[in-house]
Each structure stands twice: as structure tokens, then as C-alpha cells.
Image (cartoon, rainbow, N blue to C red):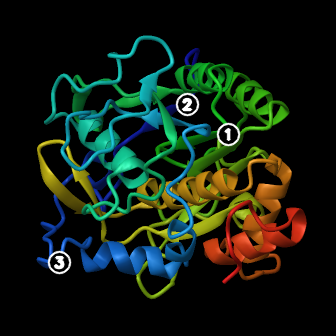
């Protein structure tokens, strides 16, 4: 494993080479109505997010830590207010909009904090985001930007100490691993003790297995499903992924581009923010709920798959209904 631990990469192997680097799959276009593209609406519908999005845009009292690349803050479809760094306010801003790290970070942040009605899913635009870049904008050989687990562990601790209640990691190790990483394990255990939920992409190697990240019981690993609600063959699965994780849309996801209006990509990197955004909305609506109740509601709302390495598909509205049974209806809302 080496002194610096297992590398995390934005690069995906063939046949999805380049997707997590922000490679253009297909241009997205508006239909003239001001509504988001059909692919975005379909992805949201697949996991029944629109009914919850109709109730809330998220709370500015809830903070999501995003471990990814830097962000093109000036994108016209991004709700930039309420974004900051764990250190200085400017260190998460892209210097090179064409860089792989900036493309990836802008895309993921757009999924969470795009303006409603934009080309992005824009799940929780009013939530506060703590952007903690773990990938450099400078090219790093042919593999693209890479972050070591020690850096990821430090970033998790920084976000938790800065007040994050949720941490999104839209990155995975280049391949499933069997060994543990003490730095990462300690950081994830620290997050659990502080009541923080960590959501992480399962990876795109079409493998059955896990890593030091997705194996931790406090992490919610996210596999990618296609538009037919079928697991994408490139998505990693495994015992821990099936036991603790969820599936979410990962095919044809449209969000904000750092060098243009929007792009459409695929992979588990872009499935993870659907789960993160759902948690953010649930916690915004049910601020008295604790992490265990939120996590239970996510699995209770999803279809139950017994002893499967494949996780159940996220059902956001089902999670909402489950949470109402646990803690009661949220203030100022009416059951539908």
C-alpha cells in the first residue's frame, strides 16, 4: 500500500475511460420551457425525489462537505451563495476551468447546488456546501488527478470539524482492495462518532468487492443504476455495498460544465450525489432527526434485497414517509 496509502482516482477504466474526468458524452439542451433536460427529470423521477424537492430546497443551517475537485463558482446556473472552504474562501475556486479536477468538482456540486430549473438536478440549492478539494488541477501523468487516502482522511476530519453533517465522496480507489487503511478508518470512525453520514461512490470497475472506504460500516456506498432501474454493469458491488449501500441513477446524468453550460456523464461518481442530496433534504425537513434515523429511513424506504451484493435502489419519497413514522411530520408541511 505504501507510506501514503491507496490512491483515489477520478479516472475510470475502459469502457468508461474519461467519464469521471468530465468527458463529454452528449450535449444537453433545454426544451425551451425553462425546465431541466428530460434525462435530469427522468433520473429524479427514478428515485422519487421530486415530491421532496417540492417541499424543500434544503436548509442553510445544514452543511454538506464535498470532497472532490475545485469548482467554477461563477457558473450562471450555480447557486454560489452558501459555498465556502474549510480554510480560506478562495481555495476551492477553479484556476483552470478546463482541468479534469475542475470539471468533475463543478459537475458534482451542480448536482447538489445548481439553481432549480437549471440543467442540473439541483437537489438542495439552499444547503451550505464546504468544498474541500482533494484532486489537484494540474495534470498528474496519464492517470489523471489522484488523491491518497491520507489526504482523503485529513479532508474528512477537516469537514467534520468545520460542521459538516454529511460528506460526499464522488471518487473511488482504482480497484477494490482487501487491506485496511488506518488513517482512513480512523477518520471515518471519527465522523460516525460525531453523527456525520458519509456517502461514497462504489467505483466503476465492474468488480465484486470493496475498499477501505466502502467497507467501513459508517459509509453509505452508492452503486449506479441505469434509466430502467437496472444495475449498470460497470458499477462495483459487494457484500458491504449490498448491506450498507444504495443504488442511484448513474446513466446519462446532466449537470454543470466548467467550460460550457452543461454536459452529460455517467458513473457512480454521479450516483452518489443523489443519495447525498436526498439526505440533505430529509435532514432539512427533519432537523431533530439523528444520523441513525436518517440512515434507517433510507434503507426502510428502499426495496429490501436480502443477502444481495447489489444494493436496493434509493426511494427518496419512501425514506421521507419512513421518517415521518419515526419522528412525526416535519413542521409546516402537509402529508401527501
> Is the Cβ of the residue at disc 1 closer than 8 Å to that at disc 2?
yes
| Residue at x 69%, y 29% (from the top left corner) | 181
Point out the image quarter for the C terminus.
bottom right
Q: Residues within 10 Å of mark 2 (few under 14, many from 20)?
A: many
Above or below: residue 82 compared with residue 273: above
Point out the image quarter for the N terminus.
top right
Q: Is residue 276 visible?
A: yes
Q: Nearer the viewer, mark 1 or mark 3?
A: 3
Q: Secondary structure at mark 2?
A: loop
Q: Residue furthest bottom?
A: 228
Q: Nearer the viewer, mark 3 or mark 2?
A: 3
Residue at mark 1: 212
Residue 150 shown left or right of residue 17 in the figure:
right
Q: CA distance from mark 3 to mark 2?
A: 46 Å
Above or below: residue 195 compared with residue 300: above
Marks 1 and 2, the one that precedes in the sequence:
2
Q: Secondary structure at mark 1?
A: loop
| Residue at x 30%, y 42% (from the top left corner) | 106
Residue 24 shown left or right of residue 89 in the figure:
left
In the picture, the disc for residue 12 is none
Above or below: residue 299 compared with residue 11: below
| Residue at x 27%, y 80% (from the top left corner) | 38
The x and y percentages for residue 160 are 67, 26
Residue 143 shown left or right of residue 277 in the figure:
left
> Is the Cβ of the residue at disc 1 closer than 8 Å to that at disc 3?
no
Residue at mark 2: 6
Residue at mark 3: 33
Marks 1 and 3, the one that precedes in the sequence:
3
The x and y percentages for residue 114 are 34, 51
Q: Residue furthest front?
A: 332
Amino acid at each position: 500500500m505504501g507510506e501514503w496509502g491507496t490512491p483515489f482516482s477520478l479516472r475510470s477504466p475502459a469502457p468508461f475511460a474519461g467519464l469521471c474526468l468530465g468527458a463529454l458524452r452528449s450535449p444537453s439542451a433545454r426544451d425551451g420551457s425553462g425546465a431541466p433536460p428530460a434525462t435530469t427529470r427522468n433520473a429524479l423521477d427514478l428515485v422519487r425525489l421530486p415530491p421532496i424537492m417540492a417541499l424543500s430546497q434544503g436548509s442553510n443551517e445544514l452543511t454538506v462537505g464535498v470532497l472532490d475537485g475545485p469548482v467554477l463558482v461563477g457558473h450562471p446556473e450555480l447557486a454560489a451563495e452558501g459555498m465556502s472552504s474549510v480554510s480560506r474562501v478562495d481555495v476551492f475556486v477553479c484556476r483552470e476551468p478546463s482541468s479534469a479536477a475542475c470539471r468533475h468538482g463543478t459537475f458534482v456540486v451542480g448536482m447538489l447546488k445548481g439553481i432549480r430549473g437549471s440543467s442540473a438536478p439541483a437537489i438542495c440549492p439552499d444547503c451550505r456546501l464546504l468544498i474541500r478539494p482533494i484532486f489537484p488541477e494540474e495534470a498528474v501523468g496519464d492517470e489523471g488527478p489522484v488523491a491518497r487516502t491520507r489526504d482523503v482522511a485529513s479532508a474528512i476530519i477537516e469537514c467534520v470539524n468545520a460542521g459538516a453533517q454529511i460528506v460526499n465522496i464522488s471518487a473511488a480507489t482504482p480497484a477494490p482492495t482487501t487491506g485496511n487503511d488506518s488513517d482512513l478508518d480512523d477518520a471515518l470512525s471519527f465522523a460516525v462518532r460525531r453523527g456525520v453520514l458519509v456517502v461514497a461512490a462504489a467505483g466503476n470497475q465492474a468488480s465484486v468487492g470493496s475498499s477501505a472506504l466502502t467497507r467501513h460500516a459508517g459509509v453509505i456506498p452508492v452503486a449506479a443504476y441505469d434509466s430502467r432501474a437496472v444495475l449498470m454493469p460497470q458499477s462495483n458491488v459487494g457484500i458491504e455495498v449490498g448491506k450498507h449501500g444504495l443504488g442511484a441513477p448513474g446513466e446519462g446524468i446532466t449537470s454543470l460544465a466548467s467550460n460550457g453550460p452543461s454536459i452529460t456523464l455517467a458513473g457512480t461518481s454521479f450516483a452518489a450525489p443523489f443519495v447525498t442530496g436526498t439526505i440533505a433534504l430529509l435532514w432539512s425537513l427533519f432537523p431533530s432527526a439523528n444520523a441513525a434515523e436518517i440512515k434507517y429511513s433510507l434503507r426502510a424506504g428502499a426495496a429490501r434485497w436480502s443477502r444481495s451484493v447489489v444494493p436496493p435502489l434509493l426511494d427518496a419519497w419512501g425514506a421521507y414517509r419512513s421518517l415521518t413514522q419515526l419522528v412525526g411530520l416535519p413542521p409546516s408541511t402537509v402529508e401527501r
